[in-house]
Structures are given as C-alpha cells and as structure tokens.
Image (tube, grey):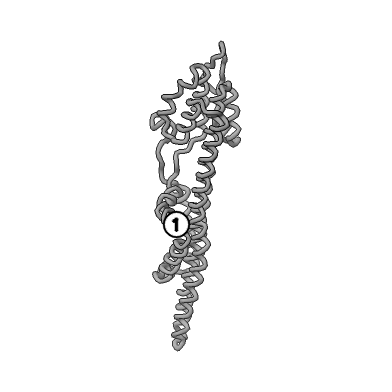
C-alpha cells in the first residue's frame, strides 16, 4: 500500500468475507425460516415482482444520478465487496522510520522514498515537505484533498442509501399492482388466497433487498470511508512531524494517538536512543 508489494505483505485487495458472508447468512436465514414453517422455495420466486422492485428501484435512483455518478457506480460497488489493503499500524511504523532517516540525513534523503511510495496521497505529502513548502500550506493542501475525498465518498454512500429507501416503496407498489390484478379476477374465490400470497412477494423483495443489500452496502461504504480518512489524517500528521524535525519517539507517540486500544497493544512501542542528535532504531518491543 505504501512502498509496493515488497514492503507490504498485505498488498492488493481481496473479496470482503464479511460483506459476502453476511448477505449469504441473511438470505439463508430467510430461506430456513420459510422451510421451518413448511413453505417451499418456489413460493418466493416471482419474476414480475423482481422486475418491479429491482427495476423500479434502479430507475428511481437513476433519476437522481449524474452521468459521472452512473459511470462510477461499478467502482463504488466494488469498494463494498472488496477489502482494501489499509494497514494504519504499518503506515505508522514506516512514517516513524522516515522521521528517523530525515532527522539523521535531512529531508532531501527522503526523495527516493517518496518516489517509491505507491500511495499517491503519501507521495504528494512527502514531496511537498521535501520541496520546503510552508507547513501550514502543506496542511491546507492535504486537508483540502481529504475534504473532497469525503464528498466523493458521501455521494457514493448516498446512492445505496437512496436505493434502500426506494426498494420498500417499490415493493408496496408491486403488491398493490398484484392485488389489483387479483381483484380483476375475483369471480374465482378459490384462487384468491394464492394470488394474495404471490402479491405480497413484492413487499418481501423490497424490504429484504433494502435491509439485506442496499442499506448494509451503504454502511460498509461509510466504514471504508472512515478507514481511508483516518489513514490520510495519520499521513498528514506524520509528514508534518517529519518536516518539523521532531524526535522519532515523539512522532511515534503522536501517531499512536490515532489507534484504538487494541491496535496500540498490537503495535509494540519502538525504543529510540539519541546519540549526537541522531536517532538509532532498535527493532524490538518495549
């Protein structure tokens, strides 16, 4: 994530097991409940209802989207289904190592590290510091980028939040249409029971798709957004600390403040010995 595959064994992305597993578990519980009540799976299969709910939901959502948002929709969905390689603890370790190098050799010594960074945000942050940009200007530039990142993520999250709101309504609409169709054939009362059951399948589709798919995806995107913003904030504070020439021990303690208690316990405190205004890292736990 930061220095390419050689520096990060977790580089790359993989399918998010919680997203896929949660969806399969939720659907499986619905099917199991139907079976326990003596029902049959074919009772839940209704193609017209699926067309009304899914097609209507997508159409209603499409009205509020711009052409750019529509093009970005597959990428937004991928963010929910694929787990990114975000390791804040490893980022902190690397930033502390860079602070030690900068304190010993100067900021210009970080040029090669900046060029090798695979994270574009980190690369720009380091380059601004190396170029001697005023620290306040560095913070303003990077925070502005974070602000626009938040806005883009908010728009992606809002797409699935909207779908989660439209789907139940489309399910009710499909049920009403089914009941209208049933009432038009009221001359055969023996068929009214199955027809009513079939009509309510649309409501089931709408409510279940909203609460098992669209709204959970929106929540997942919100979680992804928070993780990425936190990583960016760590980078900003770390690079500014490096630029100011802070002691690596202080840089480490400053960045550890971003971690949860569990993450702090998992990240051993590094010991630093300062000799002749130079830092030497001992790679062992405190």
Quarter of the rendering occupied by the N terminus: top left
| Residue at the spot 54% in from the left edge and 14% down from the top edge | 278
Residue 170: x and y, percent?
Answer: 49, 68
Quarter of the rendering occupied by the C terminus: top right
Residue 191: x and y, percent?
Answer: 44, 82
Q: Residues within 10 Å of mark 1 (few under 14, many from 20)?
A: few
| Residue at the spot 58% in from the left edge and 22% down from the top edge | 246
**Secondary structure type for disc 1:** loop
Residue 119: x and y, percent?
Answer: 44, 35
Up/down of 177 relative to 133, above or below: below
**Which of these two is toward me, 106 or 271?**
106
**Which of these two is toward me, 16 or 12?**
12
Q: Which residue is mark 1?
A: 66
Up/down of 196 relative to 80, above or below: below
Q: Does residue 115 appear left or right of residue 274 in this picture?
A: left
Residue 96: x and y, percent?
Answer: 52, 25
| Residue at the spot 60% in from the left edge and 24% down from the top edge | 250
Up/down of 262 relative to 181, above or below: above
The residue most toward the top is: 276
Query: How many numbered marks appear?
Result: 1
**Which of these two is toward me, 213 or 129?**
129
**Which of these two is toward me, 135 or 18?**
135
């Amino acid at each position: 994530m930061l220095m390419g595959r050689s520096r990060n064994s977790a580089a790359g992305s993989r399918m998010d097991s919680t997203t896929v597993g949660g969806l399969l578990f939720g659907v499986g519980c619905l099917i199991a409940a139907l079976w326990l009540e003596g029902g049959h799976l074919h009772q839940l299969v209704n193609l017209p209802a699926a067309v009304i709910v899914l097609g209507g939901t997508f159409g209603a959502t499409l009205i509020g989207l711009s052409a750019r948002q529509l093009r970005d929709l597959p990428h937004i969905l991928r963010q929910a289904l694929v787990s990114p390689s975000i390791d804040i603890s490893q980022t902190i370790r690397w930033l502390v190592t860079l602070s030690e190098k900068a304190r010993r050799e100067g900021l210009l010594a970080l040029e090669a590290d900046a060029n090798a960074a695979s994270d574009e945000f980190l690369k720009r942050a380091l380059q601004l510091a190396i170029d001697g940009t005023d620290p306040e200007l560095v913070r303003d530039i990077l925070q502005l980028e974070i602000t626009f990142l938040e806005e883009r993520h908010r728009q992606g999250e809002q797409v699935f939040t909207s779908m989660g709101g439209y789907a139940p309504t489309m399910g009710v609409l499909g049920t009403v249409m089914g009941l209208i169709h049933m009432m038009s054939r009221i001359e055969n009362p023996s068929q009214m029971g199955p027809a009513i059951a079939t009509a309510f399948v649309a409501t089931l589709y709408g409510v279940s798709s909203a609460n098992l798919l669209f709204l959970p995806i929106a929540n997942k995107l919100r979680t992804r957004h928070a993780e990425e913003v936190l990583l960016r904030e760590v980078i900003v504070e770390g690079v500014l600390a490096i630029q100011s020439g802070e002691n690596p021990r202080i840089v480490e303690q400053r960045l550890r403040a971003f971690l949860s208690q569990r993450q702090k316990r998992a990240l051993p405190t590094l010991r630093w010995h300062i000799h002749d205004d130079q830092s030497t890292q001992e790679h062992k736990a405190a």
